[in-house]
Image (tube, rainbow, N blue to C red):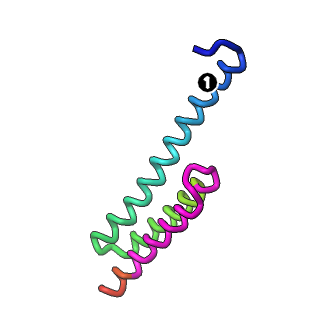
Amino acid sequence: MPNTQSAAKRLRQNEKRRLLNRATRSNMRTAIRRVRDAVANNDLETAKDAFQAAQKKLDRAAAKNLIHKNAAARTKSRLNTLIKNAAQAA
């Protein structure tokens, strides 16, 4: 339990931010999963659309320091490579 007013406020802020971060991270992971699922099902048009959404979510998470900017870039690169390889195989 916080002993001061400022500590109590800080506790409330941390709880609110934790929930927002958790939701953002969950949405980001879902977007990534949609791209991978679409590629696995050989649905390249859906994969490309899902990739656009995933890119936006990854950039937003990196901007909020939820993940490192290099981690976002690496994930986008790997997803893009996955799509390109699937397109060549088809």
Query: At 43% from the left edge and 70% from the top edge, which residue is drawn?
Result: 79
Residue furthest front as drawn: 3
Secondary element at tag 1: helix
Report how many numbered discs are placed on residues in the image. Answer: 1
The percent coordinates of residue 85 (x first, y second) are 36, 82
Q: For residue 14, which quarter of the picture?
A: top right
Q: Which residue is under mark 1?
A: 11
Residue furthest right as drawn: 6
Q: Give the camera-side residue of 10 and 21.
A: 10
Q: What quarter of the picture does the C terminus occupy? A: bottom left
Q: Give the camera-side residue of 6 and 35.
A: 6
Q: State the extent of the magenta-drawn residues as a range.
A: 62-84
The percent coordinates of residue 6 (x first, y second) are 72, 20
Q: Give the camera-side residue of 56 and 43.
A: 56
Query: At 34% from the left edge and 80% from the top edge, which residue is drawn?
Result: 86
- Judge from the rendering whether residue 56 lies leftward or rightward of residue 90; answer left or right: right
Residue furthest left as drawn: 41
The percent coordinates of residue 32 (x first, y second) are 42, 60
For disc 1, the neighbor class at 10 Å (few under 14, some 14 to 19, many from 20) is some
Q: For residue 3, which quarter of the picture?
A: top right
- Residue 41 among magenta residues: no
Query: At 29% from the left edge and 70% from the top edge, which residue is drawn?
Result: 40
Kind of residue at disc 1: Leu
Q: What quarter of the picture does the N terminus occupy? A: top right
Q: For residue 45, which quarter of the picture?
A: bottom left
Query: At 71% from the left edge and 15% from the top edge, which residue is drawn?
Result: 5
- Residue 72 among magenta residues: yes
Main SS category, magenta section: helix
The percent coordinates of residue 80 (x first, y second) are 45, 74
